[in-house]
Amino acid sequence: MNGLEFCRRLREISLTPIIIVSVRDEEKTIVEVLDAGADDYITKPFGSSELLARVRAALRRLPEKGGIAAEAGDFSIDFAARKVTVRGVEVHLTPKEFDLLAFLMKNPDKVLTHTILLKKIWGDYYAESPEALRVLVGSLRKKIEKDFSHPKYILTEPWIGYRFIPKEN
């Protein structure tokens, strides 16, 4: 596996900061790596002071261990522990359900297309598989909605995607 694929796979399972060190300085390469999930990109040669400053900056962006990193209405997520609380009760989510809810919560009230969600959760390979997303959303709704057949938080935007509403209507 190449570095780009490694970056994608690591980002799927971890919030660990990723700093790419490379001799390649083409804009296309840098953009591709950052879009794959890297936090920073530094080209050789570089000074050790610059590298250490970039490491410190990446570590500052990490959520505090055990702390709530995101809250929206009845929901809170502890990114470090990968725990979700809904209306004060911890809810067990699969890794993909967690990733989906986390991404939705980071983008409240925004319509997120099927393609964006598929790429974010599964990567480019599933970009044209909305059925997988539909199943995942249904499973997540069963765990977080009071009445999953009449969702109040994860709303369907027909033929487009989904929208997360942080407070119950």
Image (spheres, helix red, strand yellow):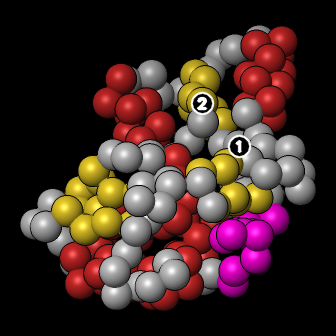
- The kind of residue tagged 2 is Asp
Q: Is residue 36 visible?
A: no
Q: Earlier in the sequence, mark 2 or mark 1?
A: 1
Query: Tags 2 and 1 in contact by the CB under 8 Å rule?
Result: yes
Give the magenta-colored segment's residue range.
81-92
* 88 falls in the magenta region: yes
Where on the picture, by quarter, is residue 56?
A: top right
Residue 30: percent from left, percent from top: 43, 30
Which mark, by number, is residue 17?
Answer: 1
User: What's the residue at 60%, 77% (across, down)?
Assistant: 95
Residue 4: percent from left, percent from top: 47, 51
Q: Nearer the viewer, residue 169 or 164?
A: 169
- Mark 1, secondary structure of its residue: loop
The residue where tag 2 is placed is 40
Q: Is residue 39 above or below residue 133?
A: above
- Mark 2, secondary structure of its residue: strand
User: What's the residue at 86%, 44% (across, down)?
Assistant: 64
